[in-house]
Image (cartoon, helix red, strand yellow):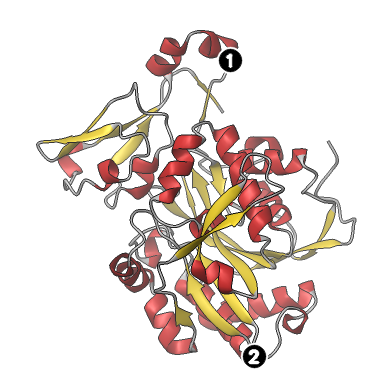
Amino acid sequence: MKNLLRNIGDDVVSLINCNGYDYNKVKKALEISFENLGGVEKYVKNGTKVLLKANLLMKKTPETATTTNPVFVQALAEILINAGAVVTIADSPGGPYTINMLKGVYEASGMREVAEKTGATLNYDVSYESQPCKNGLISRSFEIIKPATDADIIISVAKLKTHSFATYTGAVKNLFGVIPGTYKAEYHLRMPTIEQFSDMLVDLCEYVSPTLSFIDGIIGMEGAGPSAGKPRKIGVVIASENPHNADVVGAKIIGLKIDDVPTLKSADKRGLITDFKIIGDEIVIIDDFDIPKKENRNIVFKMLPWVAKTFSARPIVIEQNCIGCADCAKNCPAKAITMVNKKPHFDYNKCFRCYCCQELCPKGTIIVKRSKWILR
């Protein structure tokens, strides 16, 4: 495999160190990022409609590192608005795609305050459109939220996190949020393996074709991401026109190779990862970043499905901390969860280990129990 981190090729990934969410420091890091990529005026002019597709997974505060930090979004929005852009902030969080859901997520994540300070618009249009994906490897169409179809350009504003199902989430995985609400569960159900799901995510990324991708890696998440892990200082801002290249750098920083990340592996097979040069600061690899372990996929598991069901990782609930909200049951793609005495009970014969329950648990009380039959 070619060395994808050599300083060769015409493509660029900007990497800027930033040690905290001081507004002036973050804005400066983003301004330098734009300069490294050719200047903000290369991408927007007066009246350009820009969608900032932030990671607003669920109703979590910025301190949890679950969502894109509001200071990061505020500084980015201000730079674009000052260049003449008309900026909309949008995402379809986990769960139902409703106005009340959006209001709660915008409030908790700090996006309401971002809009007030910058003049950016928060999206409350919960309509969506079916769009063809003619060149998709696994997907021939997508349901896409209206602000994404209305925008002149889309900027992925991701959070650098680990992910219990996908290993890593960054610029590409962030775009799953243009799929409305419970349609996400249908994609999980139709594509239950991580390989199929990753092929779909790459199809979606190529359809959306973000003009730019920024990754908030100032404070990321390690462990049981994307919502139940622990905040971890990383101290970087990553930006690129190529979302796959941006994710190569983000993954590299936390110790992951292309073959470790299913979306990168899929993109690499299609030739979507290019040789590129890094402009800005040098990569510093964090060698003790807590990465979710992978399940063993050896031939025994393929030959004996009951062995896989018995020994594979599975979600379990810490009952004493469960508040009985039933979000896990409502959003389970496989309908493998029932509520008994206000506690979730799992049918592991139906469960296909997408870990949406863990991802959307507001209190982090669902964890993934790993067996000894796993590999790093």
> What amino acid is labelled 1 in the image?
Asn
Residue 131: x, y in percent?
58, 57
- The image shows residue 135, relative to residue 124, as above or below, that is above
| Mark 1 vs mark 2, CA separation in Å | 54 Å
Q: Is residue 110 left or right of residue 5?
A: left
Say whether residue 177 is left or right of residue 210: left
Between residues 80 and 200, which one lies in front from this camera angle? 200
Residue at 83% x, 61% y: name it.
11
Report the residue at 48% width, 17% height from top: 373
- What is the tally of numbered marks visible in this picture? 2
Quadrant position of residue 52 = bottom right
Report the residue marked by disc 2.
Answer: 84
Q: Can the viewer see residue 286?
A: no
Quadrant of the frame with the C terminus: top right
Q: x%, y% of residue 351?
A: 36, 28
According to the image, label 1 marks what residue?
A: 298
The amino acid type found where label 2 is placed reads Gly
- Answer left or right for 355 relative to 13: left
Residue 116 in the image: state x and y as whole percent. 41, 87
Position of 10 relative to 294 (above/below): below
